[in-house]
Image (cartoon, helix red, strand yellow):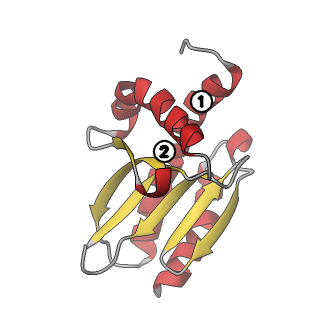
Amino acid sequence: MRLREWMEALPKRLKPLLPPDLSGFRWTARPWLVQIYYRDPAFHYEVWHLGERRGRMEVGLHFESRDPERNQAALEWVSLHIWEIRHHLGPYVEAEPWDRGWAKVFETHPLPPLDEESLARFAQRLALWIQTLEPILARERTGTRSK
């Protein structure tokens, strides 16, 4: 399968894996990545093929607004919940500031063959990311600090 095809197929595989309240996402794709978002495209889930040379695929939540302070505030909120996130997603999840005043919460995986099996596996992984992080983000939006 070509990389562009794989990325464009991912949202279609993702949708049935999510509960109804999370299946109404929007998405954009480029030949090397796909972005899934709900309210604001600047805050999106991303699966990113980092290239053959790096040999990695990233899954994460990116905060890429034009306002670095907004991105930093989102990163700080998510960082307060990093142990809860790692409990659900595993110990290799990182949260850090990034390029251009952006920030991200992410993990990387060895570059998979671009086939149906990896497409299913990454769709399941992305579904778990969304189901883990969306409730945390909702608490931040509503100002609710408890679980």
Instruction: Say which element carries label 1.
Output: helix
Q: Which mark is residue 83?
A: none
Q: Is residue 113 above or below residue 95?
A: below
| Crowd tier of the residue under label 1, counting other residues whose Cα lies within 10 Å: few below 14, some 14–19, many 20 or above | few
Horizontally, is 107 left or right of 64 in the view? left
Q: Is there any visible trace of residue 81 in the rendered image? A: no
Question: Residue 31: percent from the left, percent from the top?
Answer: 52, 81
Label 1 sits on residue? 135
Give yes or no for contact between labels 2 and 1 (Cβ–Cβ under 8 Å).
no
Q: Nearer the viewer, residue 64 or 34?
A: 64
Residue name at image x 47 percent, y 87 percent: 2
> Which residue is at a point 62% across and 23% down the rendered structure image?
139
State whether residue 62 is above or below residue 78: below
In the displayed orientation, state which residue is furthest to the bottom: 2
Residue 54 lies, in percent from the top left, at 25, 73
Label ID, residue 129: 2
Tell me the kind of residue under disc 2: Trp
For badge 1, the amino acid type reads: Pro
